[in-house]
Amino acid sequence: MPTAIVTGVTGQDGSYLADFLLSKGYRVVGMVRRSSTVTFGRIEHIQDDIEIIQGDLHDQSSLVSVIEEYRPDEVYNLAAQSFVPTSWKQPVLTGEVTALGVTRMMEAIRLVKPDTRFYQASSSEMFGKVREVPQTEATPFYPRSPYGVAKVYGHWITVNYRESYNLFACSGILFNHESPRRGLEFVTRKITHGVARIKLGLAQELRLGNLESQRDWGFAGDYVEAMWRMLQQDAPDDYVVSTGVTHSVRAFCEAAFGHVGLNYEDYVIQDPRFYRPAEVDLLVGSPEHARKKLGWQPKVSFEGLVEMMVDADLQLLGREAI
Ligand code: NDP
Ligand code: GDR
């Protein structure tokens, strides 16, 4: 039974990846940071099937201890300060966790068990002010937020450790992926939760920022499989993971409100409070390399994703109302 350590297991992707690895027969060890309240909402259903260990990407010795104790075959580094707007408010913390945290984890692997296979959660935010359309593994980076800058560091340190120490280290450049488990502050979930609240009479409006930005949105459940496939190859490499299709925030609103028979124009208010100091206007990735090398392709369409998320929020809020 192979052992996998997942950092960020309490997050959206960590919870789907843990589900996936369990279905493949892995021993799954989830690393969580200490907090005064329990943050296990997304992994409640598998809490008895995975092992939880405390560790923090700020703390080098905690990472060394985790690798020493579990001697993993694979490490998936999903933990990060992942919300782009917060990265302008907390740029130093974002750099510590999202950038230097990657080095700390790779150092722990290099020192304790260098044959561990390593996955780094890189991001399409690294492309920022895009240099070409669609974006591929060879597209130059131009990040537009402290978060994007931190992810560029995480990407290059992964490549550097692979080339310097011959580690099996992969960087997955994942485009936006969403699900009913997405955090409430991200725009897709904010919209689907807002739609459900309005439909159930719990709210009258939804305040958003820039409606014109375009994203290549996929389903998180599909994307975690690509992470795993990267670590099953003969040699490490970097991969763009995306659908190849882009939609605006406005189009997401139209689809989400439309799914419950409402017109988004009657409810959505543009509020400058949610504008960003620098925006990423357009993202669309080419998943060709992942398709050819990993045999990976997304299963859930944009429309399927929107409907899945709206239906889940209607159910959640309906249940809460009882
Ligand atoms: P989430 O924000 O849902 O989860 C982030 C996780 O990181 C949480 O489990 C959080 O723990 C944990 N974490 C934060 N700080 C620390 C720390 N100092 N030490 C240990 N753990 C910490 O993110 P997602 O699941 O959406 O994303 C997973 C990864 O993929 C992130 O690295 C993100 O940047 C990246 N990514 C995500 C994309 C997406 O569209 N979702 C696209 C491309 C990249 P806690 O629960 O305690 O807060
Ligand atoms: P993003 O996701 O920044 O792409 O990062 P987010 O959903 O926050 O924003 C997407 C786009 O929507 C616009 N937008 C709003 N965004 C939020 N959050 N709230 C609003 O009210 C709102 N109105 C409009 C934004 O301006 C932006 O253009 C996500 C994260 O998961 C990162 O960790 C990950 O690396 C990238 O996706 C790929």
Image (cartoon, rainbow, N blue to C red):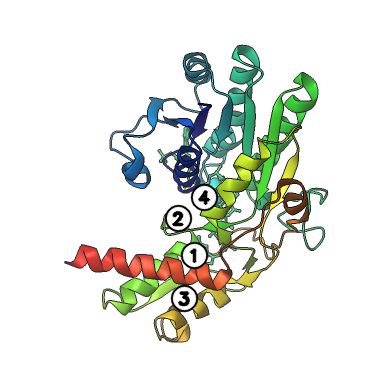
Q: Is residue 233 left or right of residue 56?
A: right
- Element at badge 1? helix
User: Splitting the image into four quadrants, where does ligand 2 fall?
Assistant: bottom right
Q: Disc 4 and disc 2: Cα gap in Å?
A: 11 Å
Q: Earlier in the sequence, mark 4 or mark 1?
A: 4
The residue under the point 75% across, 32% down is 234
Q: Earlier in the sequence, mark 3 or mark 4?
A: 4
Q: Residues within 10 Å of mark 4 (few under 14, many from 20)?
A: few
Please, what is the three-letter code of the amino acid marked with disc 3?
Answer: Ala
**Circle 4 residue:** 83
- Element at badge 2? loop
Q: Disc 2 and disc 3: Cα gap in Å?
A: 15 Å
**Circle 3 residue:** 256
- Element at badge 3? helix
Residue 28, picture quadrant: top left
**Circle 1 residue:** 188
Q: Disc 3 and disc 1: Cα gap in Å?
A: 9 Å
Q: Earlier in the sequence, mark 4 or mark 2?
A: 4
Q: Disc 4 and disc 1: Cα gap in Å?
A: 13 Å
Ligand 2 neighbours mark 1 (CB distance < 8 Å) = yes
